[in-house]
Amino acid sequence: MESFPIINLEKLNGEERAITMEQIKGACENWGFFECVNHGISHELLDKVEKMTKEHYKKCMEARFKESIKNRGLDSLRSEVNDVDWESTFYLMHLPVSNISDVPDLDDDYRTLMKEFAGKIEKLSEELLDLLCENLGLEKGYLKKVFYGSKSPTFGTKVSNYPPCPKPDLVKGLRAHTDAGGIILLFQDDKVSGLQLLKDGDWVDVPPVRHSIVVNLGDQLEVITNGKYKSVEHRVISQTDGEGRMSLASFYNPGSDSVIFPAPELIGKELKKEKKENYPRFVFEDYMKLYSAVKFQAKEPRFEAMKSMETAVANNNGPLATA
């Protein structure tokens, strides 16, 4: 099997730009995932984020996680469980409105650091979206414009710790799923592995590379590209050893009122192919309401459900959402 794509973004600024763009294109078309190095976010900042995130877990979350595990009887598992994840998390919202000042138990220095980190990740997300536009033959800024809706994209970070698990064969760190949103940037532990993606029927490890950012594509990009790019099922496996695994997944998603539909330029672009939208048109908020109930199920029924909703609205002569 071909190796997991690791892409040096620094080469976009030199003679190897065309080759690097082709690497990004291949990763999006064949993997739905890639890992970038030399992405413009300083190693010093990433080291601080890692250090303070792990300190915060030890100080404020570890005891609560252990108590929660005990209360749910997960410390004495005898058979596999499929309705729970072995993770400790909290969420930071950045856009449209930040909640960093309101999240309890965060030290002021950590709040300040995470605001800086979010700004860097937001900038990189938008740069990557423009690279995708270039590869797809879309106007620069097209994806960002779709994601903005009437106000702004939805942008937030899920901060996760995956503590050592005594029976990793019985419970996953995070169950298999595709991501609902747009583009996801992950800063993960470089010492402890665990993230896997499904490729050609096999689970493949996403290698932990120091100071890298892992990128994966969500369901909305599959729709907008009319299936040229696909969101990919992934999971986190539990580990027995070490101090546990840290993960910061930042989701750059469409705004709640963004209308999502296949880009007209990508419909039937291939030679001799019938012009057909393979995906429905919907409002992102409606998709998220459905996703929240069926996150760990296959994505195809979600698309079909949105298509049925679109048809029902049309048959009732209701207003169809337009761009």
Image (cartoon, grey):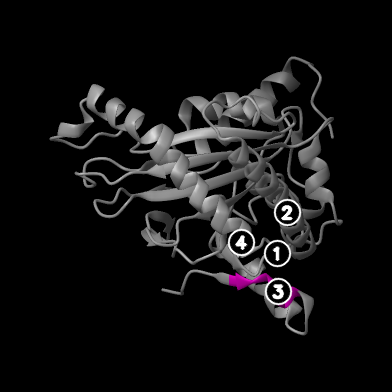
Q: Nearer the viewer, residue 99 or 11?
A: 99
Q: Is residue 293 left or right of residue 88?
A: right
Q: Secondary structure at mark 1?
A: loop
Residue 175, percent from left and from top: 38, 41
Query: Earlier along the polypeptide chain: callout 1 or callout 2?
Result: 1
Question: At x 73% / y 63%, what residue is drawn?
Answer: 270
In magenta, the rendered stretch is 7-12
Q: Is residue 87 above or below residue 320?
A: below
Q: For mark 2, what is the residue?
A: 274
Specify the amino acid type for callout 1.
Gly
Q: Dot 2 surroundings within 10 Å: few (below 14), some, or many (20 or more)?
A: few
Q: For mark 1, what is the residue?
A: 40
Tell me, for residue 10, which label it has, or none.
3
Residue 108, percent from left and from top: 62, 35
Query: Could you give the CA–CA distance between mark 2 and mark 4, rounded to whole angstroms?
Result: 51 Å
Q: For mark 4, what is the residue?
A: 44
Q: Secondary structure at mark 3?
A: helix
Specify the amino acid type for callout 2.
Glu
Query: Could you give the CA–CA distance between mark 1 and mark 2, rounded to whole angstroms?
Result: 41 Å
| Prevailing SS of the magenta stretch | helix
Question: At x 83% / y 31%, what residue is drawn?
Answer: 151
